[in-house]
Image: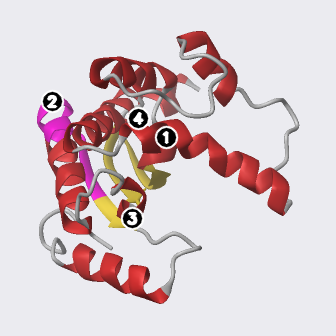
Amino acid sequence: RQFFEDVPKAQLHVHMDGALQVDDIWTISQELGTPLPGLSEQTRESLETFYRVQPGARFDTPETFNAFLAKFGPTIALMQTPKGIQKAAQAHVRDLAREKHVYAETRFAPQYHRGRGMSLQDVIHEALLGLQAGYLETGTLVKLIVSIGRECDNETSMAVAHAAAAFHKNGVVA
């Protein structure tokens, strides 16, 4: 077991806004003064409870899958400003490095992070800046896979694709 924990790894399927650790979410929310949606109280303990999944929990019906998707609420709330996106992306790289990942391709849907009026290109740019800062800090290289939410209409989907294409040689791999 120790061998597998210590060996350098590559991660090819992870969602940045779904992979942040509770410590990172709480720290960033406190630094930015961002309230976290879905919590009974704005406390670290409430955040831990929010993310706790009961053993045997299933997410195979529309209702249970929607409950699972609601778990993204706090991280999406954090990632509505340039600083929030950068801090979350950098924390994501640190988390991957802590698990001995030397390379990763992380999925990120920029259309969920435009709440404060940023363009799709601005959102992608800020995520790439955070990933670069994480790389400089840890040596773990993380590239971005820009994804499109399943509920997006054609206009949004095309806008996301065009925004991603603008960065195809600068950190976006898909």
Location of mark 2 (residue): 137
Closer to viewer: mark 4 or mark 2: 2
Q: Which residues are magenta?
A: 133-143
Q: Quadrant of residue 45?
A: top right
Which secondary structure lies at badge 1? Answer: helix
Q: Quadrant of residue 79?
A: top left
Contact, mark 4 vs mark 2 (Cβ under 8 Å): no
Which secondary structure lies at badge 4? Answer: loop
Marks 3 and 1, how far apart at CA: 18 Å
Magenta segment: does it hold 140?
yes
Q: Give residue 35's position: percent from left, percent from top.
A: 45, 27
Location of mark 1 (residue): 19
Q: Is residue 8 visible?
A: no
Contact, mark 3 vs mark 4 (Cβ under 8 Å): no
Which sits earlier in the primary sequence, circle 1 or circle 2? 1
In which quadrant is the N terminus drawn? top right
Which sits earlier in the primary sequence, circle 1 or circle 4? 4
Q: Nearer the viewer, residue 2 or 142?
A: 142
Q: Give residue 69's position: percent from left, percent from top.
A: 65, 51
In which quadrant is the C terminus drawn? bottom left
Identify residue type, mark 4: Val
Which sits earlier in the primary sequence, circle 3 or circle 4? 4
Q: Residues within 10 Å of mark 2 (few under 14, many from 20)?
A: few
Location of mark 3 (residue): 111
Residue at the image point whose x is 42% and y is 31% from the top: 99
Q: Residues within 10 Å of mark 3 (few under 14, many from 20)?
A: many
Residue at the image point whose x is 64% and y is 46% from the top: 70
Q: Give residue 112's position: percent from left, percent from top.
A: 43, 58
